[in-house]
Image (spheres, helix red, strand yellow):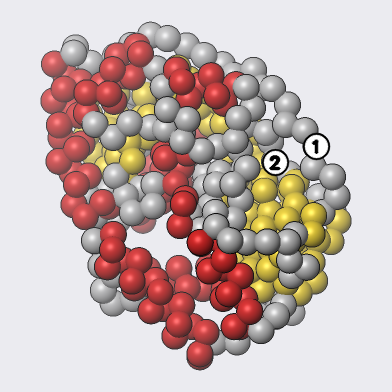
Amino acid sequence: MAAAGAASPRAVVELFVRKQPFRSIQIVATPGSGNGRCFATARALQGALERKGHRVALATFRDLDRLQAWGCRPRGDFSLLVCVGGDGTMDAVAGTAIARFAPILPVPAGFGDLFGRALGCPRDVASVVALADGGGEIVGLDVGLKDGVAFLCHESFGFIHDIQDRTERAFWTPQHRGLRLAAYFRTALRHLVDTPLEPMRVVVDGRPLAHDAIVATIANVETYGSWLRLTPDASPVDGLFDVFLVRQTTKRRMLAKLVAFHLGLAREDPHVVVGRGSAVAISDGKGFRADLVVAPRSLRFLVTPAAARALSAGAPARRVA
């Protein structure tokens, strides 16, 4: 793969750590995530935390739009925000947590759960309660901002983004993991047939990285998990995005490259460009433009001690617990 300049070594980061129980806890959940498991998990957490003496409020939201609206004017006071859902759920509350200076405890319960998996966040009620009751450590993690809106995992543009957007906007998107993956593959095949690949210009920290990218992923953690490891070394504590691009080529070759990454068979390729930087600008010839910047260690997360140790040592963001 071609690289954009020399990547600076990852520095050891000092993270703010606090060990103490939280007495005022707000739980938010999106019941549609995780094939309906979110609501049951959130209710079980509420009961278990209350039995431990915590003051707990639970709010559930039918969709992310309602959650974001709540985030603009959250009621009550809380010292910990427990977020039960997927990556979209955590993105929706990130701005609220930053503004309130309240740490987030992610409870992965969605389809991808990329951010929660990267931090090694537990899913079972007993482990989550143990973290909230004084067994966890608070770390400051990077947040991505796309045109001022927070994201935690990654932002994709071009072919991959179009497939994801087209699948999620379908009249019916299956919740079962296997059926959902099959829906993505079907959409990808249709997209290859009926949609042209539009080239994009990508600039990283003021330096042009590509003028003809048809796939662009700007990542804060490893993208798409084990399914499509485009940025395996991305870390949420280095103050940098990892950038993955596929330059213009035929649809068949582009698909073959992505399949190779899926199977772990990717090799050096002049059409694949990787880079790293704190600011990325993406534009095309039709007036589209997106500006992405890193807000270093601006959001606090409650994680396991093992995850905190790995992150403080500058370890890549992958499952550390």
**Amino acid type shown at disc 1:** Ser
Image quadrant in which the C terminus is located: top left
Indicate the quadrant where residue 158 lies: bottom right
Q: Residues within 10 Å of mark 1 (few under 14, many from 20)?
A: few
Q: Is residue 310 left or right of residue 239?
A: left
| Disc 1, SS | loop
Q: Amino acid at mark 2?
A: Leu
Q: Taking 142 as reference, is 22 above or below it? A: above
How many other residues sit within 10 Å of disc 2, few (<14), some (14-19) or many (≥20)?
A: many
Rendered location of residue 128, percent (x, y): 29, 25
Work out whether residue 314 or residue 133 is closer to the camera in this orientation and state it.
314
Distance between the alpha carbons at the discs numbered 1 and 2: 10 Å
Dot 1 or dot 2: first in sequence order is 1
Q: Is residue 147 visible?
A: no
Residue 3 shown left or right of residue 64 in the figure: right
Instruction: Read off the residue under disc 2.
Output: 240
Residue at (46%, 77%) from the top-left corner?
188
Label 2's element? loop
Can residue 190 be seen in this snapshot? yes
Q: Which residue is mark 1?
A: 8
Residue 46 shown left or right of residue 107 in the figure? left
- Image x and y of residue 136, in percent: 39, 17
At x 45%, y 70%, the residue is 165
The reply to whether dot 1 and dot 2 touch (C-beta < 8 Å) is yes
* Residue 180 numbered mark, or none: none
Task: Estimate the x, y position of residue 279 in percent, counting from the top left.
Answer: 74, 49
Q: Nearer the viewer, residue 148 or 273?
A: 273
